[in-house]
């Protein structure tokens, strides 16, 4: 009985081939599912503060809604059309693209009801800041029985 064992190139050679091919060939990236943005939520005595990282979006393309204690944030990242420089016939080929485009959204529920009328939003340097005041606690009312 003959044992047939074939040894392939070492791991280092294979890894080098993979890296070499990565930078030469175009890479397909599935942009249909954009990564959700990161959110930090802090609770104070009177309000919640939310910071959401939404870079590359115009403030006009961000929507925030507050319903009871539910907060929804959505944004649309629009893809810019890439065209050849005017006056040249050069056509460029995209080799790699990692920037996401499309719609992204996050919704979350907070422990307290929110005062939607008093909510404030500010968008600076790719960070959305929301200040969401808690709804004033209603005092218990005793109901008279007739």
Image (cartoon, grey):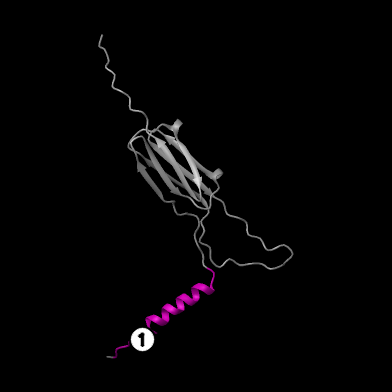
Measured as percent of width and height from the top left, residue 57 is found at 53, 50
Secondary structure found at label 1: loop
Measured as percent of width and height from the top left, residue 70 is found at 39, 37
Q: Residue furthest top?
A: 146
In this rendering, position of residue 29 left or right of residue 133 = right
Q: Is residue 8 magenta?
A: yes
Observer-nearest of 145 and 141: 141
Q: Quadrant of the N terminus?
A: bottom left
Q: Is residue 2 above or below residue 93?
A: below
In this rendering, position of residue 1 left or right of residue 129 = left
The quadrant holding residue 138 is top left
Residue sitting at x 41%, y 31%: 115
Q: Is residue 27 above or below residue 8?
A: above
Residue sitting at x 38%, y 47%: 40
Label 1 Cα crowd, 10 Å radius (few <14 / some 14-19 / many 20+): few
Q: Is residue 9 magenta?
A: yes
Q: Report the label total.
A: 1
Observer-nearest of 75 and 27: 75
Q: Is residue 115 above or below residue 130?
A: above
Q: Residue furthest right?
A: 87
In this rendering, position of residue 140 left or right of residue 37 = left
Q: Residue furthest left?
A: 145
Q: Quadrant of the C terminus?
A: top left
Measured as percent of width and height from the top left, residue 43 is found at 34, 40
Residue sitting at x 49%, y 72%: 22
Q: State the residue position of label 1.
A: 7
Measured as percent of width and height from the top left, residue 110 is found at 35, 39
**Region rendered in magenta:** 2-26
């Amino acid at each position: 009985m003959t044992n047939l064992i074939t040894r392939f190139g070492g791991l280092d050679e294979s890894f080098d081939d993979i890296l070499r091919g990565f930078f030469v060939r175009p890479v397909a990236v599935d942009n249909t599912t954009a990564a959700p943005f990161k959110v930090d939520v802090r609770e104070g005595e009177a309000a919640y503060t939310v910071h959401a990282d939404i870079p590359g979006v115009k403030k006009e393309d961000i929507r925030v809604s507050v319903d009871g204690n539910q907060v929804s944030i959505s944004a649309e990242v629009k893809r810019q059309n890439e065209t050849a420089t005017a006056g040249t016939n050069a056509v460029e080929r995209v080799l790699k693209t990692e920037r996401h485009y499309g719609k992204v959204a996050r919704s979350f529920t907070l422990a307290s009801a929110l005062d939607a009328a008093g909510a404030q939003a500010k968008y600076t340097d790719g960070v959305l800041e929301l200040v969401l005041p808690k709804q004033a606690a209603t005092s218990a009312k005793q109901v008279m029985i007739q």
